[in-house]
Image (tube, rainbow, N blue to C red):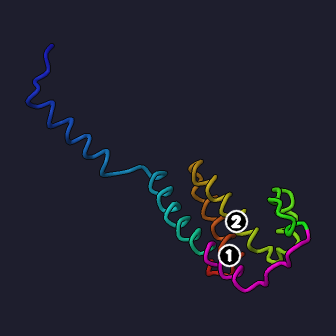
Amino acid sequence: MRVNTVYARPLVLVLLTAATAFPTGSVTARSACSADLHRTRIAVNNALAQHAGTEPFAPESTFAKLGHQPTPATIARAEHKFDNWPNGSEAVAALQRARQANKAGDSQGCLDALREARMAIGANP
């Protein structure tokens, strides 16, 4: 049996248009979380930059004056010693959880993690 292409093409066009015009709920939820993730990431970055600007610099060590490049371990030790804002670490960890939940399509998990990140930096949940 031969299909009449005069009628088949408009039908296919209508079906494709309908499929793209009405996205599924998970895609809509993911895009909503993606937009919120972007805004929260900017807020966390701004809070971290603001906090970093208010803290004093660490003193230069004797090792730093020898002309050697610092190793990742010495950088980590220095950062850990002078990092006195644990909320920043909590916010960054919550953002990571939100990214993972968003990637997995878990919109509620993403939104919960974003709420935690905003609360950690003192922003409106």
Q: Which residue: 56% across, 64% down? A: 37
Q: How many marks?
A: 2
Residue 34, x across and y down, in percent? 51, 60
Circle 2 is placed at which residue position? Answer: 92
Work out whether residue 124 or residue 19 is closer to the camera in this orientation and state it: 124
Q: Which residue: 49% across, 51% down? A: 26
Determine whether 61 is above or below 106 in the image. Answer: below
Residue 116 counted in the magenta span: no
Label 1 sits on what residue type? Leu
Circle 1 is placed at which residue position? Answer: 48
Which residues make up the magenta segment?
Answer: 45-62
Work out which residue is located at the far left of the displayed protein and give it: 6
Q: Please identify the quarter of the rendering in which residue 6 is found.
A: top left
Left or right, 119 with reference to 15: right
Say what secondary structure mark 1 lies in: helix
The mark nearer the N terminus, 1 or 2, is: 1
Image quarter where the N terminus lies is top left
Residue 16, x across and y down, in percent? 26, 41
Q: Are marks 1 and 2 in contact (CB under 8 Å)?
A: yes
Q: Which residue: 69% across, 78% down? A: 121
